[in-house]
Amino acid sequence: MNCEPFTVNAPSPDRPGESCGVFGIIGPDIDAARMTYFGLFALQHRGQESAGIAVSDGRDITVYKDLGLVAQVFNEPTLAGLPGDLAVGHTRYSTTGSNRWENSQPVFRHFGNNAIALAHNGNLTNTSDLLARLGPLTATTDSELMTEAIAREMENAELTLEDSLATILPTFEGAFTLTVMDQTTLIGVRDPRGFRPLCLGTLGDGWVLASETAALDILGATFVREIAPGEMVVIDHQGIHSQFPFADTHQQLCIFEFVYFARPDSKLLGETVHSTRQEMGRLLARQAPIDADITVPVPESGIPAAQGFAEVSGIPYTDGLVKNRYVGRTFIQPAQEMRERGVRMKLNAMAGIIGGQRVVLVDDSIVRGSTTRQLVGMMREAGATEVHLRISSPPYRWACYYGMDTGDRSTLLASDHTVDEIAAILGVDSIAYLELDSLIRATGAPTNVFCTACLSGDYPTSVPDVGGKFLLESSP
């Protein structure tokens, strides 16, 4: 990611960047903008660069979006100016390119008497082919490219939004979970591999689409089911139906939804994320036992795995790292010294707990290693006599083309280092990663329903050979 403004809570270099959140709602007497606002709050963890809402009153679509967190972008006057009972919303994290207002979502197109708004989570892998087919465009993101393709199909072929999507969706390759709307219809889509999640719920007589079930909970909506891979669910004020425009579908949900992306209180594939992360920790303790005094999590996503590790190992769990929960996204340009101290702005080790102890430090993943190295240094400074690192996922060795911010392989710590070499680089007394089969077992799901490309190098689709970069900025 190449963000122009520095952001103090930008995703850690030691973990993949968040995958964006999408939302949609339709229903009689629903204040769609306000409900979308609350839904985006629940999806804030999936993207903190920008937020946006598109709302329809049945005649016109109004879009409001800006850089920043949901609470920074919207207020009472703003929401009051977005009347309607149909809306889509988005929280953005860009996997490549700049954090610019122009790239915030939902993407909007107006043409003739029609208008559409689109929110996207994922990455297309065939943007060059689509550009060649569509001709010269001013689009700078794959999300804009999709919107343009849909709008042209609607305008040139005089099709409805549903029929246009059914025609154009099979030309998209890669990862794309979408919420799309025109003035009267809400549509949710998952690509034929289902890389990114999408669920369906009811709210009174209305319907809700969201990246995670936690967004339904915050509204008091009732979970109905997950949208299937390759499914296009179509909702208007007359009812709901689905169609499957793709010839071949097969569930391959990103395994990192369980490891890191999803909220612990969300459910995926019928399992609560928190419980699966605890099971990862239990399996890790059995796989890589160690003699130590305390188990310390890296907050927040390392907490459940540390709880599971402590339960099985018998090494007492303690909160040895304190997280500053008020470090929010900012566009202030700090001095270089403060950039380098970014980890200390977010986490601080408690010497009274750490001092004189042999520490098991539990985290969910390591991507580049710089932040982990700083955390280990903090443990040493706080007086830890030993630091044993336990990671609740396998080594991250391969670049992702489906919606995670990883860069190319050359930036990944584990791509060309052995586990012993990684331990030396990070300055730990020992390190162990959870094995892939154990990670999958912790989810309770079959092996063949996940994409594990970043861990195994087994890509489920063709990927672009452009040096790890996309021809267009991607906007999950």
Image: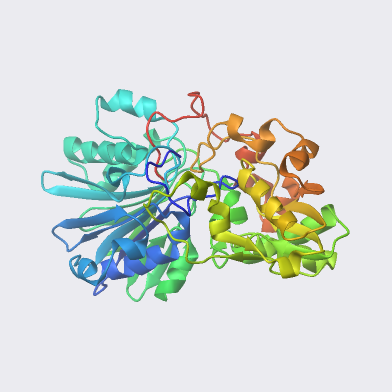
Outermost residue on the right side: it is 291
Residue 414 point in image, percent of width and height: 69, 36
Residue 441 point in image, percent of width and height: 72, 54
Residue 391 point in image, percent of width and height: 71, 51
Q: Quadrant of residue 281?
A: bottom right
The reply, left or right, for residue 257 in relation to residue 377 is left
Q: Report the number of numbered marks.
A: 0
Q: What's the image's color scheme? A: rainbow
Residue sitting nearer the eye, 333 or 314: 333
Residue 230 point in image, percent of width and height: 45, 46
The residue at the point 17 percent across, 64 percent down is 57
For residue 251, above or below residue 421? below
The reply, left or right, for residue 33 in relation to residue 455 is left
The residue at the point 61 percent across, 39 percent down is 454
The residue at the point 82 percent across, 48 percent down is 429
**Can residue 236 be seen here?**
no
Residue sitting nearer the eye, 476 or 23: 476
**Can residue 352 be seen here?**
yes
The residue at the point 46 percent across, 53 percent down is 8
For residue 253, above or below residue 379? above
The reply, left or right, for residue 330 in relation to residue 444 is left
Residue sitting nearer the eye, 29 or 286: 286
For residue 248, above or below residue 86? above
